[in-house]
Amino acid sequence: MATAPSESRITLHPHDRRVHAIIDGTLIADTTRAIELRERGYPPRQYIPRDDVRMDLLTPSETVTHCPFKGDASYFSFGEHQDIAWSYEQPLEGMAAIAGRLAFYEGASE
């Protein structure tokens, strides 16, 4: 089924379901305040408020990527797990709701 041209490429869905990120048995994030970002062609991602992430366990990475729809993403590592989470510190217009929140790669968040 073709997508209608007027349908947004990205939609944001705040919810109160519990979302957590566990890596090597360590709870990195736990929240009921995530925003689910749905982008055509990609799996849904949960963007978790920084207040609900154990930032003391994460190390900023030098990796930066650019998305033409969201902006520049900064990455974070956990021990030997490189670039396991990312954040849009200053997202593009229309994406302000995810500013500063972290998303984790599949397998880390549930």
Image (cartoon, rainbow, N blue to C red):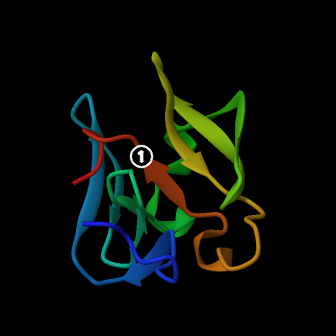
Query: With 14 as the anchor, is 102 left or right in this view?
Result: right
Figure quadrant of residue 26 = top left
Q: Label 1 amino acid?
A: Phe
Query: With 25 as the anchor, is 35 left or right in this view?
Result: right
Q: Residue furthest front?
A: 2
Figure quadrant of residue 37 = bottom left
Residue 79, position in %: x, y?
Answer: 47, 21
Q: Which residue is mark 1?
A: 104
Quarter placement of the C terminus:
bottom left
Residue in the picture at 76% in, 68% down: 92
Residue 56, position in %: x, y?
Answer: 56, 44
Figure disc tally:
1
Query: With 105 as the anchor, is 68 left or right in this view?
Result: right
Give above or below for 17 relative to 83. Answer: below
Residue 29, position in %: x, y?
Answer: 37, 55
Give above or below for 25 relative to 16. Answer: above
Residue in the picture at 46% in, 15% down: 80
Give above or below for 34 relative to 14. Answer: above
Residue nearest the observer in this picture, 66 or 103: 66
Residue nearest the observer in this picture, 38 or 2: 2
Residue in the picture at 38% in, 78% down: 33
Q: Residue furthest top?
A: 80
Quarter placement of the N terminus:
bottom left
